[in-house]
Amino acid sequence: MRKREPTYILKPTIQIMKKATNILLAIVVLATTLQAKPVTVNNAQNFAEVFYKHHAQVGLIASTLAFAEISSEGDTLYYVFNMNEKTVS
């Protein structure tokens, strides 16, 4: 007859394996579902203006596209905008 391992030794090992499996599963799910999608110049410009207004605490802004980095496949990697405060005349 085979001698049984005490359950107090096996329980922590099983719990550690369950946690490791859950973490690995979460990483795999996140890696497969998180994908970047293309952003239009207008969407990027609107986001940049809202971000700048919030953090710089300024009023009206006039933003202009200064640069757009394009990959060798033709995808836009990032946009650079110049921000200027608008003067009301």
Image (cartoon, helix red, strand yellow):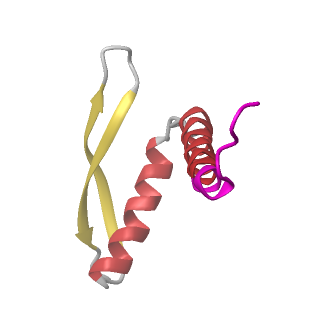
Q: Quadrant of the C terminus?
A: bottom left
**Residue drawn 43% across the image and 70% down it:** 50
Q: Looking at the rendering, which quadrant does residue 66 occupy?
A: top left
**Residue drawn 31% across the image and 83% down it:** 58
**Residue drawn 62% across the image and 38% down it:** 29
Furthest toward the top, the residue is 73
- In the rendered image, is residue 60 in sight? no
Furthest toward the right, the residue is 1
Q: Is residue 18 magenta?
A: no
Q: Please, is residue 55 above or below residue 20 in the view?
A: below
Q: Nearer the viewer, residue 34 or 89?
A: 34
Q: Nearer the viewer, residue 53 or 19?
A: 19
- How far from the left and from the top, in percent, is residue 16? 56, 51
Q: Please, is residue 61 above or below residue 34 in the view?
A: below
Q: Nearer the viewer, residue 13 or 7?
A: 7
Taking the image as shown, residue 12 lies to the left or right of residue 1, namely left
- How far from the left and from the top, in percent, is residue 22? 63, 46
Q: Quadrant of the N terminus?
A: top right
Q: Looking at the rendering, which quadrant does residue 2 occupy?
A: top right
Taking the image as shown, residue 21 lies to the left or right of residue 3, namely left
Q: Is residue 5 magenta?
A: yes
- How far from the left and from the top, in percent, is residue 33? 62, 37
**Residue drawn 65% across the image and 52% down it:** 6
Q: Which residues are magenta?
A: 1-12
Q: Nearer the viewer, residue 27 or 85?
A: 27
